[in-house]
Image (spheres, rainbow, N blue to C red):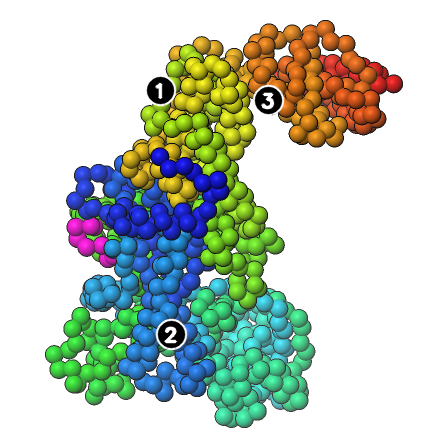
Amino acid sequence: MAELPKRYDPKTVEPKWYQRWIDDRDSVANAKSSKPPFSIVMPPPNVTGVLTLGHVLNNTIQDILARRARMQGFEVLWLPGMDHAGIGTQTAVEKYLRRTENKTRHDLGREEFLRRVLEWKVKHGGIIIEQLKRLGCSCDWSRQRYTLDEAYTAAVQRAFVDLYDKGLIYRGRRMINWDPVAQTAVSDEEVISKPQRGKLYFVRYEIVEEPGRFLEVATTRPETIMADTAMAFHPGDKRYLDLLGKHAWRPLARERIPIIADDAIDPEFGTGVLKVTPAHDAVDFEIGQRHNLPIIDVLHPDGRINCPTEPELDELDRFNARERTAELLKARGALAKTEPYENNVGFSDRSDVPIEPRISDQWFLRYPKTKEALAVVRDHLIRFFPAHWEKVYAQWLENIRDWCISRQVWWGHRIPAWYRKSQISNLKSEIYVGIEPPPDPENWIQDEDTLDTWFSSWLWAYETMDQETRDKFYPTSVLVTAADIIFFWVARMIIAGLEFKPGKSSKTEDNIPFHHVFFTSVVRDKQGRKMSKSLGNSPDPLELIDKYGADGLRFGLMRIAPTGQDIRFDEKQIEEGRNFATKLWNVARFRQMHGASNPAPKIDTQALSIFAIEVLARLNETIDAIEDAYREYQFNIVAQRLYDFVWSDYCDWFVEAAKTDIFGEDEAKKKSALAVMDFALSAILRLLHPSMPHITEELWCLLGFGKDSIQFAAPPQKSALDDVADVPGKRELVSAIYRTVQAGRNLRAEANLPLNSKIRVILRTESKAIFNQIPTLMRFLNAEEVELNPKYKTQAGNPVAITPLGEIFLAIDAADKARERERLDKEIAKVENDLRTVKAKLQNSSFVDRAPVAVVEEHRRRLGDFTVQLAKLRQARAGLK
């Protein structure tokens, strides 16, 4: 057995063990195994992405679940992979080309541009995978998948063709969300509503048939006036009924437009009159369809104005055009006024710019199996944690709209649809859809668009597996993901599983993609802001690993990750994770100093000290609490319970108490203390392993607790204390001792007595049970003597505290009397205040009559306790006069 170094160094321990796990193929799943399956598919990070704290949180949780399942005897598949990230990757390459060559993808052409993207992917792709390995992720890297793998691409095409053949995919000209930066359509789910401060512009439209009379319209987007094709009011709005059927002059790109009435108009907004712009607003488009209005598009795809008839606005950026439009309107007498205005604006989740509603020919999917997808969550075939996300999921499915699945990007899965060349200009051109090109490809041209990245990733839960793997591991056990993609990914994967039925039978329960979904929290800074590069508030996880170790980062982050709440990141918590690892290392070194550990220690329950009984009972409670927390995916509770048990119950109390026996002359007591230490340490390492895999593996090996990896060691069982007499009584005594020790330590601190100086302690107590624990009390209190004296008479200047065992006094020099008088005065004032509060409650007849009997009795008990405590404190204070 190798000796533990004096200092724990994660920089040497962590890489060593991770490489050994890889070499030993410890995380490679065996589809032929007879063990019960446990499986997770990793939410695939972008192929060119780098590790963020969000990735650290998500993947640490997945690793905890995978490692714990291995220890429980499951055959574990944690399947990793990457997403091609169509828009994100293409945008990054296009920016690079503009910066280095001043070229666009259109300058290069499709084939050459895709070759450049592939070069970029080879150079920058997969970095995050190596970073996840540094975190300690125990994935089955032999099964790593990519959404542009040949087999995966074929599966995406099959899904498209299948849904098209069923009439669920169609091509149509509809209002869509347009991202002017990425210059592509995005789905409704990719539009994020953000409050924006802007202006409300009140614009005057002159009535054609009544010169000098004007209709006033309130708008936030005057730059689209040139696309107005009607004015509209609510048919019940009597203010404007006489204008129905007449016309107004459009003030920019001047033209007469009809005045109509439509139920969609809100009479309460602005002036109650709407300028109808069918090309640039979804509601206006629907109004235009009902009234057969023309559609005028005055925006280029990149958001610039496209209106040669207004040369001062033509080619301006849309936001610059807004201000210039206001100036033009004012100069022409058409701008009545402006007012500050705050409204919600849809932003592209991809480019973080305001989207533009736009009429466009796109491919759409009518979602299948929506009722079934609702039912599997409602009936808890799939359970969400936290459960409140079930309502959010249901609301989306109950109000679902067709999914725009085509994207105007080149990097991705090209849509397997072709148009007959001779009819290409015809909107009703003949369309061929198939896995293979048409039989006469020279007469057809393939659609230029690619599929939404989410259209490929909704197949991720099963298309990442070959048939043998799927038969063993599908449906997967749990999905760990962020709540902000509950619609993008989670709901769609459920729909895909129910529609395509990849399971071993046609039963619903065999085709859901996962049994549980755990939604992680958002990591924010201490001010509550989301982490971002632009704010400079997002630390580099690799720098944190270099500084504190992967285990320190993992454990520190888990302690501040409450289920269902956002995380306020504080690097001090990561430092505490590192300090916790150091504490564990040092206590393991202490054990090793006293001989070899026993991997299967035999505990003689009749020889146990009361402190050993207490730590074993606390270990049992900790095991139960951890099991309960895991069932509800409460990882912060798991981490905190382990932290409290290891740091406080085991290290600070039990190990310190055990030193009395370990350094004593009684070999039987020493043997018993070491056996309990081995039992507890072995359990601690196994409980901690899922969260802190590297240090626990190192200590497991160096302490000799097992010949094989700790990854496959069975979880600890609770110790049997059934045959120990009066466990509650012994635990009560230990609790009284610990509280007495804390009181004594507080007295020492308040009296400013150095921790390393020996003191003399007097305990005025009637307890006989404490007699045998005097040596341990002396150790805890760093006392040269602990005198038990039930008739002790207070000496002037002796600090005193009331404890469960009686009064504890410190024998101090006369020079410390002044400090002790000050301390006692403060303590007396506090108890007097508490006593007044309790008396006031009990003198209030309303409280006594209405409060529960138990509450009233508790107040009466406190009244007696405070009265006795105050008398003793005053007696001690009197002795200092």
Q: Which residue is mark 3?
A: 779
Horizontal side of residue 407 vs 429, given as left or right: right
- Where 76 sits versus 86, above or below? above
- Where 863 sits versus 560, above or below? above
Residue at the image point whose x is 66% and y is 19% from the top: 784
Q: Which residue is mark 2?
A: 90
User: In the picture, which quadrant includes the N terminus?
Assistant: top left
Q: Which residues are magenta?
A: 463-470
Q: Which residue is mark 1?
A: 602
Which mark sits nearer the N-terminus, 3 or 1? 1
Whole-Å distance between the Cαs marked 2 and 3? 67 Å
Which mark sits nearer the N-terminus, 2 or 3? 2
Which mark sits nearer the N-terminus, 1 or 2? 2
Circles 1 and 2, Cβ within 8 Å, touching? The answer is no
**Residue 253: % across, % down:** 53, 90
Relative depth, front residue between 194 and 136: 136
Query: What's the amino acid at mark 1?
Result: Lys
Circle 3 Cα neighbour tier, 10 Å, few/some/many (<14 / 14–19 / ≥20)? some
**Residue 266: % across, % down:** 55, 67
Q: Residue furthest left?
A: 439
